[in-house]
Image (cartoon, coloured by chain):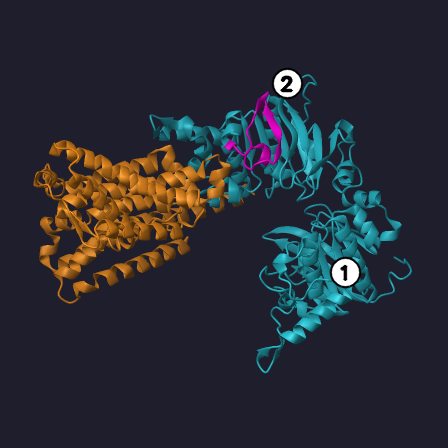
Chain colours: A orange, B cyan
Amino acid sequence: MSVNEESIQSTSHRRTWRDVDLRAVAPFAALALLLIVGAIVNPNFIGLNNLANVATRCAFIAIIAVGATFVISAGDLDLSVGSMVAFVASLMILFMNSGVIADPTLMLTAAVVFAVAAGAACGLANGLITTVGRIEPFIATLGTMGIYRGLTTWLSQGGAITLREPEIQELYRPAYFGSILGVPVPIAIILAVTAVAAFILYRTRYGRHVVAVGSNSDVARYSGIAVNRVRTIAFVIQGLCVAVAVLLYVPRLGSTSATTGILWELQAITAVVVGGTALKGGAGRVWGTICGAFILELVGNIMLLSNFISEYLIGAMQGAIIIIAMLVQRSLVRKS
Amino acid sequence: MNPEMVGTGSVVLEARRISKSFSGVQVLFSVNFELRAGEIHALMGENGAGKSTLVKILSGFEQPSSGEILLGGKPVMLPPNGAAEALGIVIIHQEFNLAEHLTVAESLFLGREVTRFGVLDRKYMRAETRRVLDLLGCRVDANALISSLSIAEKQMVEIAKAISRDARVVFMDEPTAVLSREETNFLFRQVRKLRDQGTSFVFVSHKLDEVIELTDRVTVLRDGQWVKTSPTAILDGESIAQLMVGREMSSLYPAKTEPDVDEEIVLRVDSLSTDYVKDASFEVRKGEILGFSGMIGSGRTELMEAVAGLRSRLSGDVTIRGEAVPSGDVHAANRRGLAYMTKDRKAKGLLLNSGMTANLTLQSLDQHTRLGYLDPTSEAAALEKARRRFDIRVRDGDVVARRMSGGNQQKLLLAKVMETEPEIIIIDEPTRGIDVGTKQQIYHFISALARDGRSIIVVSSEMPEVIGLCTRVAVMREGRIVGMLEGDEISEQEIMRYAAGLKRMAAA
């Protein structure tokens, strides 16, 4: 009997190794492959400038996707992030345009706090509708996706909302275009957000609860975890990440419109899935998510630099990537 | 019925030396069973005696590992997944197989709709449904939606479905579990009527009185073996109960230590009711092991989940050391030192895709948190300690729970619950699906916890377990605590009498 058990354990050991490692490694392997392909397609591609550019451009999606990693790990889904970006950004610009505070520095500080609060509130709304309202997250956030988008269109009266104060513009510009110790600010912020998120997900009680809820909410409930609170907080974290993305987005263009952030939810969810997080919850990989966001942007970049695929097909390509990523994920699971 | 008539009918369905194993565990040992035309045959046995497996084999849902099945005297291989209905063998499940949004007529003809020129012949199907329902004396409208029917009426529709398929053999698994007395009487009248027309019934039930009232013959199984087949008329409830139990107690269990009568009462439950549990009251002393016995579905788990705050109560009070515990609040119960260990370790106890550490500390992460940071060293130390204390044997410390043996999973679950350092531990089915060696270990853990001054409630469907471990045993039946046994009263026969409704304690 004990001999039998031993042999079972030893074979399962090998399987476990394959199961865990392949899924964590896969996105990084894909990234390496893409870099090689890119270098073959166009020698300029592999240059530090180009890659830094790509990383900077993927900042919005990467940061939003970090939040999506929490929501998805907890077994939920947030489709409203693209609309939420447009809505929060519009609110922030309108706030700065309102001129309630004269001093530009103070005004900007207040606007930042305001945007963060707005993002958190949007996330909280999603969370409460899903948990207290007991509505499938897919439907709940499909609804708020329409609501946030509609409110943006209404605020902008169908046109654009533009930051008017030149002083604030000047003050705010470096938040996207500047650099810290030679690292572009957006990249620094991606790294900071990811580090904090990884810490929360892997090293805190809350992170453990998120994974437990996503993995099996009954087990979580029987273990005395307040399941609905955990899920709601994940939506709030998503809202906060959207707010951080907005803080980077506004200085870049200084304006928003009804079409801001369209299909960003697709890209964010794709980044999460490509990064190895299971869409059915229970396994979050924050660094994989960043890798996924970078892969998405790289594919677009390679298409631009190469001559044989039209860059107008980028959207189709991203759609294909999420399907391929799901297939790869499933085949890796099946092997175990 | 008339005893002379029994035995004259020809044998419709016969099982010869049927054995069945599930992944190496044998659950049926060379069982013989015969069903005659026009008889109602009771199949009796304790939980786990093999009744359901035998029913599944005789209706084609499982194939026997060895042995043969004869239908009308000829050996047959019954087709799987309900296709045996075509041979006239119908099983009426405990949970009905009726789609709520169909009408009665549609349900009756589901999967074999009658058409004329490719169009559904609704008129014919309705008329035929009416005919069958009238045959049963059932007044349900053929056009009524299933969702609008009472449970008894749904049962009737299931039976009508069986008749409309010209069933020769009907299996009924606990058909009266959800019926009131009047509904049961009505059902029995219809069953007798059909029996007199030549249909055979196999009646699986735990209710001894109903078996005696309704059936012609009884077959008793025990631990997967055939014990006896006999005309019901020459048996009484006592003798059937005797046949169902009656096995030796083994030395699996540690010596019992009874708590002092004046020992502090740590848990008091006062007339607790939920949707199913009615008016349950009991108390537990420090260092006591209290058992909860009863049939599956008697409400033990519901009661315990309500006590642990996992389920809200409709009324009643739970007090721990004199402090009231609010309804439906797991945290409050946990904080006061009460922990519940689920019987469903795979679906509700462990994160199967996580490792041992994540599982062990899930309920007690506070102990490993420093300034909001989970300390891996502290968690590793807890795992090391738990592995030694509960003898969790795995070669690889990183193994995910899914790949551990059932016994090790159960020990891990017990360790997880004990991490919260509870004073009162409710253990639901402590040894379900684990081997006998691990069972013995778990019994000793439980006994040691009690000697430590902790109070333990053991909920178990295995009677020897309750008898071997507990100094007091509560018996539940249909959502109520019907008996509270102490000392020498604790025996399988006595528990069975309460559990089957032959005996009931005076209202306390």
Q: Position of residue B478 (x, y in %)?
A: 70, 42
Looking at the image, residue A92 sits to the left or right of residue B378; the answer is left
Residue under disc 2 on the same chain as residue under disc 1: yes
Q: Which residue is mark 1?
A: B201
Numbered tag placed on residue A85 in the rendering: none
Looking at the image, residue B279 sits to the left or right of residue B217; the answer is left
Q: Could one spot residue A163 in this view of the protein?
A: yes
Neighbour class for label 1 at 10 Å: few (<14), some, many (≥20)? many
Q: Which residue is mark 2?
A: B264
SS at mark 1 in the image:
strand
Is residue B414 shown in magenta? no
Instruction: Name the residue located 51 percent from the left edge and 28 percent from the top edge.
Output: B332
Tag 2 subunit: B
User: Count the marks: how many?
Assistant: 2
Compared with residue B265, is residue A118 higher up or lower down, i.e. above or below?
below
Contact check, label 2 and label 1, Cβ < 8 Å:
no
Q: Which corner quadrant holds the N terminus of chain A?
A: top right
Instruction: Name the residue located 82 percent from the left edge and 54 percent from the top edge.
Output: B214
Instruction: Name the residue located 22 percent from the left edge and 37 percent from the top edge.
Output: A192
Neighbour class for label 2 at 10 Å: few (<14), some, many (≥20)? few
Q: Position of residue B34 (x, y in %)?
A: 78, 61
Residue range of the region highlighted in magenta in the rendering? B306-330
Q: Return the residue found at the far bottom.
A: B117
